[in-house]
Amino acid sequence: MRFLIILIISIFCITACSSSNIENTVQNSSAAKRYPLRGKVVSVDREKKRATVDHEPIEGFMEAMTMDFPIRADWVWNDLKPGSEIRAELVVDSTADEPYWLENLGIIAAAIPGQEPPSNESAASIGKEIPDFTLTNQDGNRISPKDFKGKALAITFIYARCPLPEYCIKMSANFSDLANQLNADTERREKIRLLSISFDPENDTPGKLRSYGLGYLGKDAKPDFGVWQLAVGPDKEVRKIADFFGLRYEVDPADKTQFNHSLRTVVINPDGKVAKVISGNEWTPGELLKELESTL
Protein backbone atom coordinates (compact mmCIF):
# COMPACT_ATOMS: atom_id res chain seq x y z
CA MET A 1 0.00 0.00 0.00
CA ARG A 2 2.79 2.38 0.96
CA PHE A 3 4.57 1.53 -2.30
CA LEU A 4 1.40 2.28 -4.28
CA ILE A 5 1.01 5.70 -2.64
CA ILE A 6 4.64 6.57 -3.35
CA LEU A 7 4.22 5.46 -6.98
CA ILE A 8 1.12 7.64 -7.45
CA ILE A 9 2.85 10.67 -5.92
CA SER A 10 5.88 10.11 -8.17
CA ILE A 11 3.70 9.90 -11.28
CA PHE A 12 1.85 13.09 -10.25
CA CYS A 13 5.13 14.97 -9.75
CA ILE A 14 6.53 13.83 -13.08
CA THR A 15 3.30 14.82 -14.86
CA ALA A 16 3.24 18.23 -13.17
CA CYS A 17 6.87 18.88 -14.10
CA SER A 18 6.24 17.80 -17.70
CA SER A 19 3.19 20.06 -17.96
CA SER A 20 5.20 22.95 -16.56
CA ASN A 21 8.00 22.34 -19.06
CA ILE A 22 5.53 22.18 -21.97
CA GLU A 23 3.88 25.42 -20.85
CA ASN A 24 7.24 27.18 -20.53
CA THR A 25 8.28 25.91 -23.97
CA VAL A 26 5.07 27.27 -25.52
CA GLN A 27 5.53 30.63 -23.81
CA ASN A 28 9.19 30.89 -24.76
CA SER A 29 8.52 29.96 -28.40
CA SER A 30 5.66 32.39 -28.80
CA ALA A 31 6.16 35.01 -31.51
CA ALA A 32 3.76 37.40 -29.78
CA LYS A 33 4.87 40.89 -28.80
CA ARG A 34 2.94 43.01 -26.30
CA TYR A 35 2.54 46.77 -26.12
CA PRO A 36 0.60 48.93 -23.64
CA LEU A 37 -2.25 50.82 -25.32
CA ARG A 38 -4.46 53.70 -24.19
CA GLY A 39 -7.28 55.24 -26.17
CA LYS A 40 -10.93 56.13 -26.57
CA VAL A 41 -13.54 53.86 -28.12
CA VAL A 42 -15.13 55.19 -31.32
CA SER A 43 -17.51 52.31 -32.04
CA VAL A 44 -18.17 48.70 -31.03
CA ASP A 45 -19.34 45.63 -32.93
CA ARG A 46 -20.45 43.13 -30.31
CA GLU A 47 -21.38 40.47 -32.85
CA LYS A 48 -17.93 40.47 -34.49
CA LYS A 49 -16.13 41.15 -31.18
CA ARG A 50 -14.31 44.18 -32.56
CA ALA A 51 -13.97 47.78 -31.42
CA THR A 52 -12.70 50.85 -33.22
CA VAL A 53 -10.29 52.71 -30.93
CA ASP A 54 -8.72 56.13 -31.31
CA HIS A 55 -5.47 55.30 -29.52
CA GLU A 56 -2.45 57.25 -28.33
CA PRO A 57 1.04 56.61 -29.76
CA ILE A 58 2.29 53.13 -28.89
CA GLU A 59 5.91 53.58 -27.86
CA GLY A 60 8.33 51.64 -30.01
CA PHE A 61 5.62 50.38 -32.33
CA MET A 62 3.30 52.87 -34.02
CA GLU A 63 1.98 56.42 -33.95
CA ALA A 64 -1.49 57.48 -32.82
CA MET A 65 -4.20 56.07 -35.08
CA THR A 66 -7.85 55.09 -35.23
CA MET A 67 -8.03 51.34 -35.82
CA ASP A 68 -10.28 48.30 -35.50
CA PHE A 69 -9.16 45.77 -32.88
CA PRO A 70 -10.43 42.26 -32.15
CA ILE A 71 -11.19 41.75 -28.43
CA ARG A 72 -11.64 38.16 -27.32
CA ALA A 73 -12.85 38.65 -23.75
CA ASP A 74 -16.63 38.24 -23.48
CA TRP A 75 -17.16 40.46 -20.44
CA VAL A 76 -16.16 43.71 -22.15
CA TRP A 77 -19.19 43.81 -24.42
CA ASN A 78 -21.53 44.58 -21.54
CA ASP A 79 -19.55 47.67 -20.53
CA LEU A 80 -17.65 48.88 -23.59
CA LYS A 81 -19.40 51.87 -25.19
CA PRO A 82 -18.46 54.59 -27.67
CA GLY A 83 -16.70 57.25 -25.64
CA SER A 84 -15.21 54.81 -23.10
CA GLU A 85 -11.56 55.45 -22.30
CA ILE A 86 -9.55 52.25 -22.09
CA ARG A 87 -6.13 50.82 -21.38
CA ALA A 88 -5.14 47.42 -22.74
CA GLU A 89 -2.33 45.26 -24.05
CA LEU A 90 -1.94 45.13 -27.81
CA VAL A 91 -0.78 41.63 -28.75
CA VAL A 92 0.94 41.31 -32.14
CA ASP A 93 1.62 37.83 -33.49
CA SER A 94 2.15 37.41 -37.24
CA THR A 95 1.93 33.60 -36.89
CA ALA A 96 -1.60 33.66 -35.43
CA ASP A 97 -4.86 33.46 -37.41
CA GLU A 98 -5.57 37.01 -36.28
CA PRO A 99 -2.23 38.87 -36.29
CA TYR A 100 -3.21 41.33 -33.56
CA TRP A 101 -5.79 41.77 -30.78
CA LEU A 102 -6.38 43.47 -27.42
CA GLU A 103 -6.04 41.71 -24.07
CA ASN A 104 -6.20 42.68 -20.39
CA LEU A 105 -8.55 45.53 -21.22
CA GLY A 106 -9.62 47.94 -18.51
CA ILE A 107 -12.10 50.81 -18.74
CA ILE A 108 -10.42 53.90 -17.30
CA ALA A 109 -13.43 56.18 -17.77
CA ALA A 110 -16.90 55.05 -18.75
CA ALA A 111 -18.76 56.82 -21.52
CA ILE A 112 -20.88 59.70 -20.25
CA PRO A 113 -24.61 59.16 -21.00
CA GLY A 114 -25.61 61.33 -23.94
CA GLN A 115 -21.97 62.08 -24.83
CA GLU A 116 -21.18 62.19 -28.52
CA PRO A 117 -18.75 59.43 -29.52
CA PRO A 118 -15.29 60.54 -30.71
CA SER A 119 -15.46 61.84 -34.23
CA ASN A 120 -13.89 59.77 -36.97
CA GLU A 121 -11.56 62.20 -38.71
CA SER A 122 -11.99 60.50 -42.07
CA ALA A 123 -15.72 61.28 -42.03
CA ALA A 124 -14.81 64.95 -42.43
CA SER A 125 -14.04 64.29 -46.09
CA ILE A 126 -17.56 63.03 -46.94
CA GLY A 127 -19.09 65.17 -49.70
CA LYS A 128 -15.80 66.91 -50.49
CA GLU A 129 -13.94 66.69 -53.76
CA ILE A 130 -10.83 64.57 -53.53
CA PRO A 131 -7.52 66.44 -53.72
CA ASP A 132 -5.69 66.62 -57.01
CA PHE A 133 -2.78 64.21 -57.32
CA THR A 134 -0.36 62.78 -59.86
CA LEU A 135 0.72 59.16 -59.50
CA THR A 136 2.34 56.56 -61.77
CA ASN A 137 0.43 53.36 -62.43
CA GLN A 138 1.58 49.79 -62.99
CA ASP A 139 2.17 50.48 -66.69
CA GLY A 140 4.32 53.55 -66.05
CA ASN A 141 1.56 55.99 -67.05
CA ARG A 142 0.73 59.15 -65.11
CA ILE A 143 -2.76 59.22 -63.61
CA SER A 144 -4.81 61.84 -61.76
CA PRO A 145 -8.42 62.24 -60.53
CA LYS A 146 -9.39 63.53 -63.97
CA ASP A 147 -8.83 60.04 -65.37
CA PHE A 148 -11.67 58.72 -63.19
CA LYS A 149 -14.29 61.43 -63.72
CA GLY A 150 -17.62 59.97 -64.76
CA LYS A 151 -16.82 56.63 -63.07
CA ALA A 152 -17.58 55.27 -59.63
CA LEU A 153 -14.17 54.85 -58.00
CA ALA A 154 -12.92 52.93 -54.97
CA ILE A 155 -9.48 53.72 -53.50
CA THR A 156 -7.52 51.74 -50.96
CA PHE A 157 -3.93 51.88 -49.71
CA ILE A 158 -1.39 49.05 -49.65
CA TYR A 159 2.27 48.17 -49.83
CA ALA A 160 3.46 45.04 -51.62
CA ARG A 161 5.68 43.66 -48.83
CA CYS A 162 2.90 43.71 -46.22
CA PRO A 163 2.86 40.25 -44.56
CA LEU A 164 -0.42 40.54 -42.65
CA PRO A 165 -3.32 38.53 -44.10
CA GLU A 166 -5.94 40.87 -42.63
CA TYR A 167 -4.31 44.05 -43.94
CA CYS A 168 -2.94 44.71 -47.45
CA ILE A 169 -3.30 41.07 -48.49
CA LYS A 170 -7.02 41.14 -47.76
CA MET A 171 -7.49 44.58 -49.39
CA SER A 172 -5.75 43.44 -52.58
CA ALA A 173 -7.58 40.10 -52.66
CA ASN A 174 -10.92 41.91 -52.37
CA PHE A 175 -10.02 44.41 -55.09
CA SER A 176 -8.73 41.71 -57.45
CA ASP A 177 -11.82 39.53 -56.88
CA LEU A 178 -14.07 42.47 -57.68
CA ALA A 179 -11.91 43.42 -60.69
CA ASN A 180 -12.22 39.90 -62.12
CA GLN A 181 -15.98 40.04 -61.60
CA LEU A 182 -16.24 43.40 -63.35
CA ASN A 183 -13.94 42.39 -66.19
CA ALA A 184 -16.44 39.64 -67.01
CA ASP A 185 -19.36 42.11 -67.01
CA THR A 186 -19.26 44.35 -70.10
CA GLU A 187 -21.79 46.88 -68.80
CA ARG A 188 -20.41 47.33 -65.30
CA ARG A 189 -16.73 47.41 -66.28
CA GLU A 190 -17.31 50.68 -68.15
CA LYS A 191 -18.74 52.40 -65.07
CA ILE A 192 -16.51 51.35 -62.16
CA ARG A 193 -12.82 51.74 -61.36
CA LEU A 194 -10.59 50.51 -58.53
CA LEU A 195 -7.30 52.08 -57.45
CA SER A 196 -4.75 50.73 -54.95
CA ILE A 197 -2.22 53.35 -53.88
CA SER A 198 1.12 52.21 -52.48
CA PHE A 199 2.79 54.19 -49.69
CA ASP A 200 6.16 52.41 -50.20
CA PRO A 201 7.77 54.18 -53.17
CA GLU A 202 11.25 52.85 -52.36
CA ASN A 203 10.14 49.28 -53.09
CA ASP A 204 6.90 49.50 -55.06
CA THR A 205 8.04 50.55 -58.52
CA PRO A 206 5.45 50.46 -61.32
CA GLY A 207 6.96 47.19 -62.56
CA LYS A 208 6.72 45.56 -59.14
CA LEU A 209 3.14 46.74 -58.72
CA ARG A 210 2.26 45.20 -62.08
CA SER A 211 3.69 41.83 -61.01
CA TYR A 212 1.96 42.17 -57.64
CA GLY A 213 -1.40 42.89 -59.28
CA LEU A 214 -1.08 40.01 -61.76
CA GLY A 215 -0.36 37.68 -58.85
CA TYR A 216 -3.70 38.61 -57.30
CA LEU A 217 -5.70 38.55 -60.53
CA GLY A 218 -4.70 34.91 -61.00
CA LYS A 219 -2.65 32.92 -63.48
CA ASP A 220 -5.66 32.38 -65.74
CA ALA A 221 -6.65 36.05 -65.80
CA LYS A 222 -5.84 38.29 -68.72
CA PRO A 223 -3.27 41.00 -67.85
CA ASP A 224 -6.08 43.56 -67.91
CA PHE A 225 -5.75 46.60 -65.66
CA GLY A 226 -8.66 48.46 -67.21
CA VAL A 227 -10.75 48.22 -64.02
CA TRP A 228 -8.13 47.83 -61.26
CA GLN A 229 -5.02 49.96 -61.30
CA LEU A 230 -2.14 50.10 -58.83
CA ALA A 231 -0.16 53.29 -58.47
CA VAL A 232 2.67 54.88 -56.55
CA GLY A 233 4.11 58.35 -56.15
CA PRO A 234 6.50 60.40 -54.04
CA ASP A 235 5.83 60.13 -50.31
CA LYS A 236 4.74 63.78 -50.16
CA GLU A 237 2.11 63.17 -52.85
CA VAL A 238 0.78 59.97 -51.26
CA ARG A 239 0.66 61.51 -47.77
CA LYS A 240 -1.47 64.35 -49.12
CA ILE A 241 -4.07 61.80 -50.25
CA ALA A 242 -3.72 59.62 -47.15
CA ASP A 243 -4.12 62.57 -44.75
CA PHE A 244 -7.28 63.66 -46.54
CA PHE A 245 -8.86 60.26 -45.85
CA GLY A 246 -7.46 59.85 -42.33
CA LEU A 247 -5.05 57.05 -43.24
CA ARG A 248 -1.95 56.80 -41.05
CA TYR A 249 1.26 54.97 -41.94
CA GLU A 250 4.87 54.96 -40.78
CA VAL A 251 7.94 52.77 -41.14
CA ASP A 252 8.20 50.11 -38.43
CA PRO A 253 11.20 51.15 -36.28
CA ALA A 254 11.99 47.48 -35.61
CA ASP A 255 11.96 46.49 -39.31
CA LYS A 256 12.53 49.18 -41.94
CA THR A 257 10.96 47.01 -44.66
CA GLN A 258 7.57 47.02 -42.89
CA PHE A 259 4.97 49.70 -42.19
CA ASN A 260 2.59 50.20 -39.30
CA HIS A 261 -0.60 51.54 -40.82
CA SER A 262 -4.35 51.86 -40.51
CA LEU A 263 -6.86 50.84 -43.19
CA ARG A 264 -9.07 53.00 -45.39
CA THR A 265 -11.24 52.14 -48.39
CA VAL A 266 -12.90 55.12 -50.02
CA VAL A 267 -15.84 55.31 -52.43
CA ILE A 268 -15.79 58.29 -54.82
CA ASN A 269 -18.82 59.26 -56.90
CA PRO A 270 -18.57 60.05 -60.64
CA ASP A 271 -18.30 63.78 -59.82
CA GLY A 272 -15.08 63.17 -57.89
CA LYS A 273 -16.60 63.68 -54.43
CA VAL A 274 -16.27 61.37 -51.45
CA ALA A 275 -19.37 59.21 -50.94
CA LYS A 276 -18.11 56.91 -48.17
CA VAL A 277 -14.99 56.20 -46.12
CA ILE A 278 -14.70 52.66 -44.75
CA SER A 279 -12.31 52.05 -41.86
CA GLY A 280 -10.91 48.60 -41.18
CA ASN A 281 -11.30 45.42 -43.21
CA GLU A 282 -14.82 44.22 -42.44
CA TRP A 283 -16.22 44.51 -45.95
CA THR A 284 -16.60 42.13 -48.87
CA PRO A 285 -16.24 42.67 -52.64
CA GLY A 286 -20.02 42.37 -52.95
CA GLU A 287 -20.63 45.04 -50.31
CA LEU A 288 -18.14 47.39 -51.97
CA LEU A 289 -19.82 46.85 -55.34
CA LYS A 290 -23.17 47.89 -53.85
CA GLU A 291 -21.59 51.08 -52.45
CA LEU A 292 -20.07 51.87 -55.85
CA GLU A 293 -23.30 51.21 -57.74
CA SER A 294 -25.24 53.42 -55.34
CA THR A 295 -23.23 56.43 -56.59
CA LEU A 296 -24.07 55.86 -60.25
Image (tube, helix red, strand yellow):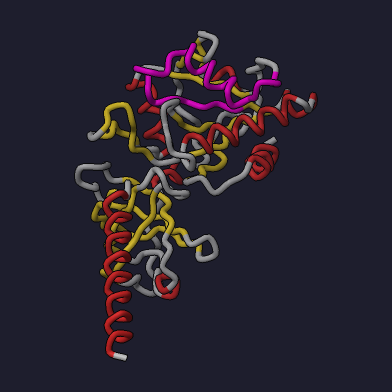
Q: In the rendering, at what x and y percent does residue 246 appear? A: 39, 40
Instruction: Locate residue 175 relative to residue 34 in the image: left or right.
Output: right
Q: Residue at x 44, y 75 (%)?
A: 78
Residue 273 is drawn in which quadrant? top right
In reply to whether residue 200 is colored magenta, the answer given is yes
In reply to whether residue 139 is colored magenta, the answer given is no
Question: Foreground: 249 or 99?
Answer: 99
2 lies above or below 118 = below
Instruction: Locate residue 90 relative to residue 226 in the image: left or right.
Output: left
93 lies above or below 132 = below
Instruction: Locate residue 34 relative to residue 166 in the image: left or right.
Output: left
Viewport quadrant of the C terminus: top right
Question: Foreground: 188 or 201?
Answer: 201
Q: In the rendering, at what x and y percent does residue 37 appear? A: 26, 55
172 lies above or below 212 = below
Q: Residue at x 31, y 61 (%)?
A: 23
Q: In the rendering, at what x and y percent does residue 98 appear? A: 45, 50
Q: In the rendering, at what x and y percent does residue 147 appear? A: 58, 17
Q: Which residues are magenta?
A: 194-221
